[in-house]
Amino acid sequence: MAMLHTVNKSAFENRSLDSCIAHAKPGSSILLFEDGVVAAMEGTVISDKIKSILGDIKVYVLGPDLRARGLSTDKVIDGVTVLEDYGGFVDLVTEHDNVQAWL
Amino acid sequence: MKLSVMINEGPYQHQAADSAYQFTKAALEKGHEIFRVFFYHDGVNVATRFGVPPQDDRNITVLWSELAKEHNLDLVVCVAAAQRRGILDADEAKRHGKDGNNIAPGFRISGLGQLIEAGIQSDRLVVFGD
């Protein structure tokens, strides 16, 4: 059963992304949105951790929340999928069996 | 698909009410049904019609009211969370001896049973919060 995990907090601020990664099963997906988008960027202390899970877990980042924070989609980690709009968020929700918000 | 949305955090303080609005709008545009939007904890503060944000800022309450009117959405506010924060409809104001009510158009006050029902009746429940 493929679960969508949503993470809306910066990985540099609290541990919700770490908790999420520790619990997410292979085949599931993680959506980074709101302040969570910073974890999708290349060249941070958490980039290697994100890269290490990409084989097992699909990672998505919400484009509008990246742009709202002045972050360039060019600097997103290779293999992390940028969702162009909220419609992409909706599609992820319907394509997965259930959704877990890591609030 | 039948979707429900839950909002646990207040407007302007945090992005949750904005994200939930954008998500709901996009879901409707894609032809999905929104079974219910449930406002809980500080999320109930979205439901006051007395908020007056600056003219160049979005009015989150009005955005939700307009979306509800356009798509006949069921916007439900948790009664216990609302009472604590002074969100009242006419019945609640009368019951508690208050001199007015402030619920915005399109919102209604009800209980947690409405959240449980949304979870049971919907294909997905998407939660927004802090």
Image: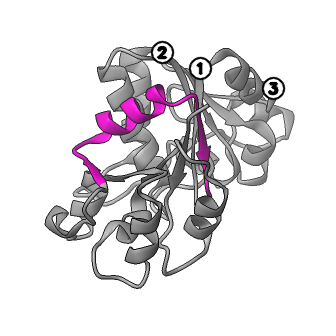
Q: Is residue B17 above or below residue B57?
A: above
Question: Could you tell me the amino acid type at mark 2?
Answer: Met
- What residue sits right under mark 2 in the picture? B1
- What residue sits right under mark 3 in the picture? B113
- What residue sits right under mark 1 in the picture? B123
- Between tags 3 and 1, which lies in front? 1
Question: Could you tell me the amino acid type at mark 1?
Answer: Asp
- To the question of a shared chain for discs 2 and 3, the answer is yes
Mark 2 or mark 3: whose residue is earlier in sequence: 2
| Chain of the residue where label 3 is placed in the rendered structure | B
Whole-percent x, y for residue B13 in the image = 50, 65
Foreground of the two, A85 or A45: A45
Cα–Cα gap, marks 3 and 1 = 17 Å
Mark 3 or mark 1: whose residue is earlier in sequence: 3
Please report the residue visible at 50 percent of the width from the left and 48 percent of the height from the top.
Answer: B50
The range drawn in magenta is A81-102
